[in-house]
């Protein structure tokens, strides 16, 4: 999206201090190297932080980049020397302190700034708030708590952070506009296609 800052994307609910910028992936080889998933728009920027912090206790962690890959890069991690040790920390999130990030200006913002903002629909009616922003590998997703449940999704919904569904972000004004009905229609269509495919598969058995 055009107003999105070209620096770390938040992928889970923040505190006042920590911003999630990546995650430890699967082991690579037998010497403890790990595939690192970057949640930054510029994937190389994750390697530029002097210190990263790893959940659950936010211990400082040092990386040495070996080479880039599709989702980020492969790195050696200080203190991890074999595949078994690497496997233990697989999936843990990586954080930086908010003060490690440069200040935004103009219409730029960090994804973490969206958490807690009011959600309005296309007609400017208040419909909920943003609880968190996630990234499961296919792009950012807004976790929205609706004021009123909607069939068939209930009150807690996951809306792809795409311009077609999220046409306006106003961090300064404290609101995010979401095409809730458009998203629900797309979700219904996708669910129907999956149902039709299952019925087709059963019919061919």
Image (cartoon, rainbow, N blue to C red):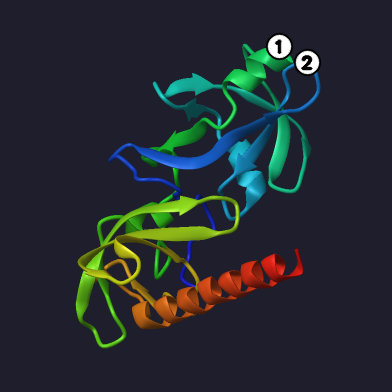
For the C terminus, the quadrant is bottom right
Give 173 or 150, whichever is nearer the viewer.
150
Give 63 or 147, whichever is nearer the viewer.
147
Q: Residue at x 63, y 71 (%)?
A: 199
Q: Is residue 52 above or below residue 179?
A: above
> Looking at the picture, how far across and down is residue 69, in whole percent?
77, 43
Determine whether the residue tagged by mark 1 lies in a helix, strand or loop: loop
Q: Residue at x 62, y 11 (%)?
A: 79
Say which residue label 1 marks: 81
Give 97 or 58, whichever is nearer the viewer.
58
Query: Does residue 163 appear in this view?
Result: no
Proximity of marks 2 and 1: CB atoms separated by less than 8 Å: yes
Question: Which numbered disc flags the more N-terminal residue, 2 or 1?
Answer: 2
- Give the class, few, some or many, for how many residues have Cα within 10 Å of label 2's Cα (few <14, many ≥20): some
Give 171 or 143, whichever is nearer the viewer.
143
- Give the class, few, some or many, for how many residues have Cα within 10 Å of label 1's Cα (few <14, many ≥20): some
Query: Does residue 143 appear in this view?
Result: yes
Numbered mark located on residue 31 in the image: 2
> Looking at the picture, how far across and down is residue 43, in whole percent?
64, 48
- Position of 8 with respect to 171 (left or right) is right
- Position of 186 with respect to 157 (left or right) is right
């Amino acid at each position: 999206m055009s107003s999105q800052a070209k620096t770390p994307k938040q992928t889970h609910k923040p505190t006042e201090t920590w911003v999630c910028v990546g995650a430890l992936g699967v082991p690579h080889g037998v010497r403890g190297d790990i595939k690192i998933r970057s949640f930054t728009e510029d994937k190389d920027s994750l390697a530029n932080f002097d210190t990263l912090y790893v959940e659950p206790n936010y211990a400082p962690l040092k990386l040495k980049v070996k080479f880039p890959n599709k989702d980020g890069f492969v790195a050696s991690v200080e203190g991890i020397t074999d595949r078994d040790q690497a496997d233990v920390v697989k999936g843990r999130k990586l954080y930086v302190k908010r003060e490690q990030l440069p200040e935004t200006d103009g219409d730029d913002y960090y994804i973490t700034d969206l958490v807690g903002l009011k959600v309005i629909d296309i007609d400017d009616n208040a419909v909920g708030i943003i609880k968190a922003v996630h990234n499961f590998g296919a792009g950012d997703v807004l976790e929205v708590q609706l004021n009123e449940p909607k069939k068939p999704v209930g009150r807690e919904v996951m809306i792809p952070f795409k311009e077609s569904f999220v046409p306006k972000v106003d961090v300064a004004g404290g609101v995010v506009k979401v095409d809730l009905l458009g998203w629900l229609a797309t979700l219904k269509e996708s669910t129907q296609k999956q149902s039709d495919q299952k019925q087709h598969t059963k019919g061919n058995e």
